[in-house]
Structures are given as structure tokens and as C-alpha cells.
Amino acid sequence: MKILILGNSNIFNRKIFPALDKFKKINIELATRRKNYNGHKISKIYKNYSEALKKTKAKIVYISLINSKHYFWGIRALNKNKHVIIDKPLTLNYKDSLKLLNCAKKKKLLIAESTVFHFHEQFNKIQSLIDLKKKISIKTFFHIPKLNIDNYRTNINLGGGCFNDMSTYGGYLINFFFNKDYNIKIKKKHFIKKNFSHGFNIIVKNKNILLNSSFKFNSKYKNIMIIENCKYKYIFEYVFSPPIDKNLVLKKINKINKKEKLIYFNKENVFYNFFKKIFKKIKLNNFIQFNNELMITEKIRNEIS
């Protein structure tokens, strides 16, 4: 199977290519204006994105461009009858997201967003450890230090800002824990200066679950989820960006006797897990789950915007 990458991005080089390179039968094409391909095994190079979409025979197009270009190239790839995967965020507004989703539905194509943190084994463990029908409190924090000024995420004209960069995490968390049952109170607070989003908080609850999430730029690094019920406290680290070269540890604390138990997870490449599921669904022509999940997440992102 061939996959065409639009954009020789940092995330392509650090995470996407190493994940795709693990698949023996995946053929990678790349459209880029750069001359440096970092020694990657690329079967074909295109000098511009239009030429690539016109000439490629790849079934899948992965769009790894600045946020403001996601819709522009996403709709063109769909209209070339390609399955489409896009770096987060899918688009910069709900209207454009709906256009992509409706186009994919009409053409019976997959459309997916490469938000992959929930493809780690620790999320399966959450489901086995916690009864979502009983009262629980969930706190999450994803704070990152100040970005370099040349990073597109610092530029509002390129679709930067904390909300565009991180709101998809909030959407997937709400969908994951509330399972469509979020007929709830959503409280939101945005930290905006000169139209640029520096951070946001969301509080979501129903009769059993209270979710309080904080996302920030320009802060001390913090990447953690804390879940509590009446008896136990669970602490998950690196929850939103699990490293591919590091074992993760879940700390389970008995709130009554204060005893701690450590649960270890082997190293996992969550991008590899994501692509493995994508390729399987395309092969079986059964990818409605991805499209539906993305539709729900985009609706939630619109609600918390």
C-alpha cells in the first residue's frame, strides 16, 4: 500500500516516518520543497503538493502541514478520491471540519486526525481499573514551556495557539470518559491576549464523573492525568504524548492505608498502533468508526471553543 505525505515536517521526521517504516509493505512517497530527506527511505519525491496529488497512485494522503493549510489540502485530497489523515487539528473551524467529514462520507473514504495518545495500552488499563458508573474525579494537565518564536504554533496567522494545538485532546477525553453521555455542564475559560490563545480550562460533569482539564503554553512542563474514586488514586504520567522510547508507570495509591502499587507498561509507539488500525480498517473497507469518532470530537471542540 502506498501513502503520500504532504509536508516534510518536524513531526513527520520524528514520529510519523519511524512508525511507517516499521511496516514492510508500506511504500512512502513525499511531497516537499526541502532538499533534505534525513536519509529516509522514500520511494518517490514530488517538488510540490499539487503535482503530488495529480500524479500519485497512493490510496492514502497524510497531511503534515501548518494548521492553516489543513482544510485546503484535505478537501483536495478527498476530491482526488484519497483516504485522508491530517495532523491535529483537523481544521481551524467547525464549518471546514464538517465540509471534510461530509465529503469523506459522500465519497465513502476514511478521514482521520492523528491524535494518538489514546492508542497506548494505559488507556485500556483505565477502562479495566475504573468503573465509570460510579463517582470519579479526573484531573488532567498538559502544560508546555515557551516555544521558539519561529515555531508555527506561536503564529496566529498560521493557525497557531494553544486551543488549536491542544483542544483535540479535550475532545477525545470527553468522548472517551462520557461516551456520548455528556448532557452535562461544560464550563470553559480561555486565556487570550491579542487574539492569541495561550491556554484554556474545561470542566465537564454528569452525575458520576467530574473532568477538570487544563492546557497551557508558556508554562512549566506538566503532562499528567489523576483519577480518583472513593478508595483509590491513579496517577498517569506522559498521558498526552507517551514517548516511544520509555516505559510508562502508573501509580495506584490506596487512599485508606496509603499503600502504593506501580503498574508498568512496556514501550509503545502510539503512531505505529494508530497506523496499524488505520491500514486494517482500510483493507476491510470498514472505517466508519474513525469518521464517526472524528465527527463527535469536532462537535465537542466546537462546544468548548
Image (spheres, rainbow, N blue to C red):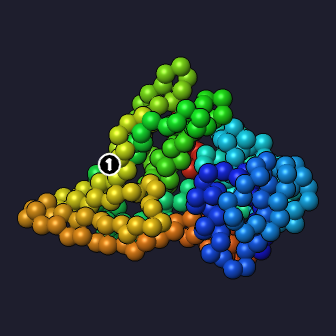
Is 69 left or right of 87, judged from the image as shown?
Answer: right
Is 120 left or right of 27, judged from the image as shown?
Answer: left
Residue 37: which quarter of the image? bottom right
In the displayed orientation, state which residue is furthest to the left. Answer: 257
Depth check, front residue: 104 or 87: 87
Secondary structure state at the residue bearing disc 1? strand
Q: Position of residue 274 (x, y in %)?
A: 58, 67
Q: Position of residue 180 (x, y in %)?
A: 50, 54
Residue 19 higher or lower than 144, as above or below: below
Residue 183 higher or lower than 104, as above or below: above
Q: Residue at x 18, y 63 (%)?
A: 253
Depth check, front residue: 45 or 66: 45
Q: Position of residue 49 (x, y in %)?
A: 83, 50
Residue beneath label 1, please?
139
In the displayed orientation, state which residue is furthest to the top. Answer: 194
User: In the rendered structure, which amino acid carries the disc numbered 1?
Assistant: Lys
Residue 251: which quarter of the image? bottom left
Q: Residue at x 73, y 74 (%)?
A: 26
In the displayed orientation, state which residue is furthest to the bottom. Answer: 24
Q: Position of residue 265 (x, y in %)?
A: 37, 72
The N terminus lies in quadrant: bottom right
Residue 160 higher or lower than 103, as above or below: above
